[in-house]
Structures are given as structure tokens and as C-alpha cells.
Image (spheres, helix red, strand yellow):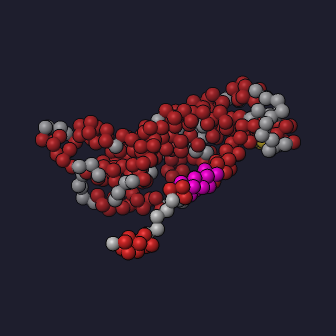
Amino acid sequence: MQQNLTATTAKWPIKDNKTITRGKVIRRVILYTALVILSLLYIYPLMISLSMSFRTLEQVTNNPFRLIPEQLAWRNYRALFTAFPFFTFTMNSLFLGLTVAIATSLTSAIVGYSFAKFRWPGREVCFTLCLATMMLPAQIIQVSQFIMFANMGQVDSYVPLIAPALMGGSAFNIFLIRQFYRGIPKELAESAKIDGAGELYIWWNIMLRMVLPMVLAIGIFAFLNSWNDFYNPLIYLHTERRFTLALGLRGFQDQTGTSWNYLMAGGIFSMIPTLFIFFAFQKYFMEGISISSGVKG
């Protein structure tokens, strides 16, 4: 018996608890140190932008990488609303962002439900073609899309910026919603049909509530993409009063130079709505991320 115990001990050596604890502490110190270094690499450009927003143009030009301003220039932020139509651009971006977010969330939920729960001829072919659009860069169809909206007389309007949201926003959104719908037991819909519920009632009162975190996460992503979009407004919007915030900030750049202090002040101010939306819907956002990372085919 003693020989067996000795052999087992030799095969499976028992580690000291202090050694295990010390190893965990070392690994955590290395991990946290790496995370702090990576965080500083991401935060440093933001701190530089914040510092530039509180300095004069001369101070920014002389020492652009100074973190602590010599004197806080609050007039940079006042100039955004007095010498620049910043409020108009912000309202335009809010209108577009909220409209795109609501349209993308609802249409992707409807289309995904159709692909997941209904059986109709050509369903799999249409879904495959929908996924195939993810392989195409947006610039490939940009010319034909611009010609289409130009022939419709919708250039210099918000229609080209909102219309894609009325078709689910992107194939990726439809794919996520569809996969999550397929994980919902079909017995729920069948029991509701026995009670006399129609398809619209089942989708609105049962299915949509079960995928609500995913729908809200898609809406948040759609809002952020619309808020930060510069390329599409640059192509379709020509009148200044219709400019979005991302496009309007280009007004601080001209042929003679760039007003970096005003540009950074506008960039810092434009972060406020996105931060508010993120913290207001943080619970649903994180739930949607966890669902999308664990979704099954």
C-alpha cells in the first residue's frame, strides 16, 4: 500500500499552495501590466485631441503633442456654436442616426424572422444571395447606386442614406437575427397558433421580445455607423444646411490650412451623444454582443 502511494505521489507531484498562489499573482501582474500598456496606447491619441481642443492654433502648431495646455481656451467650444452651424449639423446627424437605427432594427428583425420561420419557394437561394452581398466591397456598387438615386432625383437628400436601412441595413444583421430565431423552440409559435394568434401577433408579442437584446445591439451599431459616416454624406449631400456632423467638421479645413483646435473641439463634442447612448443601453448592448458571439448555425 505504501509503495502504491509512493508511486502515485511520484507520478502526480503535489504542488505547494504558496507556489500556486505566487504563480497566479505573477500571471495577473503580467496580464494587468499588458492591459494598462494597451489602454494607454488607445487613450493617448484621445488625450492629445482633448488637449488640442483647449489650446490656441499657435500653441497646437508649436507643440502638438503637449498633454497639459498652458491655458484653457474655452472659446474654441464657444466658437463651435457662434461662428459655425454646429447645432444644425448635430441635429441632422441625430435625425439620420435615430432613423437609420430604428429602420435597421425593425427590418432586420422582420427579414430574419421570414428566413428562419417561414418556408417559401426559393428561401435558401435568396438567403445565400443575401449572404453573398457581404463579399462585395461597398465601393463596387457605389457608382451604380449613385446613378440610380440620381435618376430618381434623390441626390442632395437623406433618401440615399436611409434607404439601405429599410432593407435590413446589411446581410450580417439579417444573418444574426435569423440564427437566433432558429434557436427559439417552434412549440412557442405552435401553442400561440392554437390559441388563435396570427403570425404578426406571434412575431410582435413573442418572437421580437425574445430577440430584443440582439435587436437593440443592432440598432446601436447602426446609429454609431450613421453618426460616424463621412463617405456617404460626402457623395450625396451638397447643401450645407443638410450636412451631417462628420461632414460639417470638414469646414475647419481649407486650402490655407486646418484649424486643429476647432476641429478637435468639434470631434470631442461629437463623442458625447455616442457615449450617452452606449451607457444608456449598455445592458442590452452587452447582452447582444454575448448572444452574437455564441450564436449557432
Q: Residue at x 39, y 57 (%)?
A: 130
Q: Can you tell which quarter of the image residue 211 is in?
A: top left
Q: Position of residue 226 (x, y in %)?
A: 54, 42
**Is 28 within the magenta?**
yes
Q: Is residue 138 above or below residue 248?
A: below
Q: Residue at x 31, y 38 (%)?
A: 209
Residue situated in front as seen by the camera: 35 or 247: 35
Residue situated in front as seen by the camera: 5 or 254: 5
Q: Position of residue 26 (x, y in %)?
A: 60, 55
- Look at the image and tell me in which quarter the N terminus lies: bottom left
Residue situated in front as seen by the camera: 20 or 103: 20
**Is 174 within the magenta?**
no
Count of numbered marks: 0
Q: Position of residue 147 (x, y in %)?
A: 53, 52
The segment highlighted magenta reads 21-33
Is most of the magenta stretch helix, strand or loop? helix
Residue situated in front as seen by the camera: 242 or 24: 24
- Look at the image and tell me in which quarter the C terminus lies: bottom left
Query: Do we see residue 235 in this rendering?
Result: no
Q: Residue at x 41, y 72 (%)?
A: 6
Q: Residue at x 61, y 52 (%)?
A: 29
Left or right of residue 256: residue 19: left
